[in-house]
Image: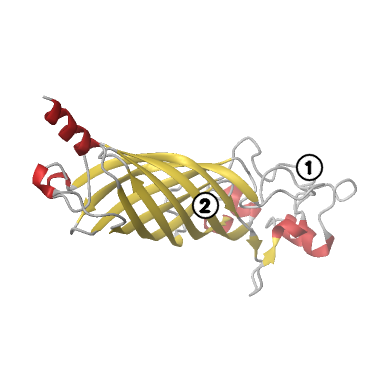
Amino acid sequence: MLSDLLAQKKHRNFKQHEIGVFVGGAYYLGDLNPGRHFFLTRPAAGIFYRFTPNYRYAFRFGYTFGNVTGDDSQSEDSDQRKRNLNFKSQINDFHVKVEFNFLEYRISNDKYKTTFFIFAGINVFNFKPLGNLGGGNWESLRELRTEGETKKYRVWQMGIPFGVGIKLNVSKKIGIGLEWAPRKTFTDYIDDVSGKYPNPNVNPANGAKGVLFSNRTLDGGDVINSQRGNPRTKDWYVFFGLTLNIKLTLSPEPCYATGFN
C-alpha cells in the first residue's frame, strides 16, 4: 500500500522545464474596432519559459510583442467612417500565467500525449499609438494630446491575460500548441481615443498638428465637446497562434522502471 502511494505521488508531482517560442497574430478591440475579432490582424511573436510541477498544472513566464491597428475608414458603421480616425501601435507584453490541463499531459510520455488547457495570469505591457493623415509619416499621438488631456496617459499598464489552447507532444523533447489569449486592460488609450473632442479655448490639442489629428471628421462640422470615443469601455488586445517548446534536462532523467514517468 505504501509503495503504491509513493508511486502515485511520483506520478503526480514530477518536474519539467521547457523553453519555447510563440508565432502568430495580434489584433485589438476598442473604440476603432468595437467587436470584430481577428479584424486587421498583424504579426506577433514571443518567447517563454514553462515550469510544470504536476501533470495538471504549469506556470509560464514570457514576453510577447505584436502590432495592433484600427481604422475608421474600414468600419461597417457609418458614424465611425465619418469620424475617420486611425492608429497603429506595437505592444510589448511581459506576463506570468497559470495553466490548467483538462487531461494529464507530459512531453515525452505517449500515455499523456495531448490536452486542452485554460490559463490566466497577470501582465505588464506598454504601447505607443501612432496616427497617419494619409501620407507616409506616422506621428506619436500621445504627444499631441488629441483630446486635450491635461496630463499624458501612462503607456505602461497592467492587464489580465487569459485564454484557451491545446497542447500536443510530438517527440521526447518537443511539444507544440495552439492558443488564443485575450488581454483585459485597464486603459482606454491604446488607440488614443477615449473621451470628447477638446475645446480649443479651454483644453486645446497640442499645436496645429494636434488639431489636425484630433478632428479628422469628413464633414468638418463643429464637434467641440462632442463624444469622440466611449470612456465607459476599456481597450483589449489579443494574441493567438502556435507555440513550439523544448523540454530541458536540468537533472538526471527519472527511472522509467516504475512506469510512472
Which residue occupies the extreme bottom position in the image?
136
Q: How is the image coloured?
A: secondary structure
Tag of residue 156: none
Question: Which amino acid, mark 2?
Answer: Phe
- Circles 2, 1 touching at the beta carbon (< 8 Å): no
- Could you tell me which secondary element the residue under label 1 belongs to? loop
Tag of residue 94: 2
Residue drawn at (40%, 54%) of the image: 49
**On-image quarter of the N terminus:** top left
- Could you tell me which secondary element the residue under label 2 belongs to? strand
The answer for how far apart the CA atoms under marks 2 and 1 are is 37 Å
Residue drawn at (76%, 47%) of the image: 197
Front-most of 36 and 190? Answer: 190
Residue drawn at (14%, 26%) of the image: 2
**Residue 54 at least partly seen:** yes
The picture places residue 231, in percent across and down from the top left corner, at 66, 38
The picture places residue 35, in percent across and down from the top left corner, at 48, 44
**Residue 76 at least partly seen:** no
Q: Determine which residue is flagged by label 1.
A: 225
Looking at the image, is 100 positioned above or below residue 40? above
The picture places residue 134, in percent across and down from the top left corner, at 64, 69
Front-most of 242 and 101? Answer: 101
How many residues crowd around disc 2 within 10 Å: few (fewer than 14), some, or many (20 or more)? some
In this picture, residue 77 sits left or right of residue 24: right
Question: Which amino acid, mark 1?
Answer: Asn
- Which numbered disc flags the more N-terminal residue, 2 or 1? 2
Front-most of 233 and 18? Answer: 18
The picture places residue 12, in percent across and down from the top left corner, at 23, 36
In this picture, residue 92 sits left or right of residue 255: right
Which residue occupies the extreme top position in the image?
1
